[in-house]
Image: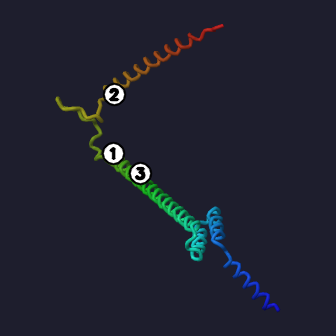
Amino acid sequence: MKKITITIAALFFTAASYAQTANDYFHNSANSYINADLQSAIEQVEQGLARFPNDRKLNDLKKKLEEEQEKQQQQQNQNQQNQEQEQQDQDQQSQNDEEQQNQEQNEEEQQQDQQEGDGSEAEPQEPKDGEPLDSKEISKEDAEKILKALAQKEKELLKEFKKQKSKNSAKHDKDW
């Protein structure tokens, strides 16, 4: 008796699956799409079209689902391209940073090498008449003159700043 009930249940289930109408396939596919299962929705609509190839609703739904699948693939491709571009930009930036660091390091090493030199340049060389003075070599007197001029300019600027400050503070009279 148990074998008969199992066989009857299996036949009933098989018959129920064959009893689906085109609308059943349409609704099941639409529900899968709504639940964000595009692949399952396409499979269900294709199963329905296998049984009902001329059903207009299933054919229209299949077109819509394929369009949606194509949009998603394009969006994924675009996202992938954007990620690749960002990675390339980051790689380029890090490469530029490394090159800049290497260049700065080389410049520092060159400056250190020049400063160390061979030790014979301890005394500043006096320029000959008509020869331009090297920008790194200034006599002690010229350096003192420049420092005095800068100090004087700083004092003048501070005086002007104090004058402007005192003028602005005098304008705050009571207005009642």
The amino acid on which the numbered mark 3 sits, given as a three-letter code, is Asp
Q: In screen coordinates, is 10 left or right of 117?
A: right
* Place of residue 165 in the rendered image (x, y in percent of width and height, measured from the top left): 52, 16
Query: Which residue is located at x 57 percent, y 65 percent?
Result: 61
Query: Which residue corresponds to mark 1?
Result: 111
Seen as rendered, the residue at the extreme left is 130
Q: Residues under labels 3 and 2: Cα distance?
A: 37 Å
Vertical side of 104 occupied by 156: above or below = above
Residue 114, how many percent across, how many down? Answer: 30, 45
- Mark 1 or mark 3: whose residue is earlier in sequence: 3
Q: Residues within 10 Å of mark 2 (few under 14, many from 20)?
A: few
Q: Nearer the viewer, mark 2 or mark 1?
A: 1
- Farthest residue to the right: give it: 1
Task: In the rendered structure, find residue 97 and report the number of the disc placed on it.
Answer: 3
Q: Residue at x 47, y 19 (%)?
A: 158
Residue ID for mark 2: 143
Which of labels 3 and 2 is toward the front? 3
Most foreground residue, 126 or 17: 17
Q: Secondary structure at mark 2?
A: helix
In three-dimensional space, the C-alpha distance between marks 1 and 3, rounded to whole angstroms, equals: 21 Å
The residue lying at 45 percent from left, 59 percent from top is 81
Q: Identify whether 26 is placed above or below 125.
A: below
Kindly identify the amino acid type of the residue bearing the numbered disc 2: Ala
Quarter of the image with the C terminus in it: top right
Mark 1 neighbour density, 10 Å: few (under 14) some (14–19) many (20 or more): few
Q: Are marks 1 and 3 in contact (CB under 8 Å)?
A: no
Give the x, y percent position of residue 124.
27, 35
C-beta proximity under 8 Å, tags 2 and 1: no
Q: Which amino acid type is marked by label 1?
A: Gln
Q: Secondary structure at mark 1?
A: helix
* Identity of the residue drawn at 65% across and 65% down: 31
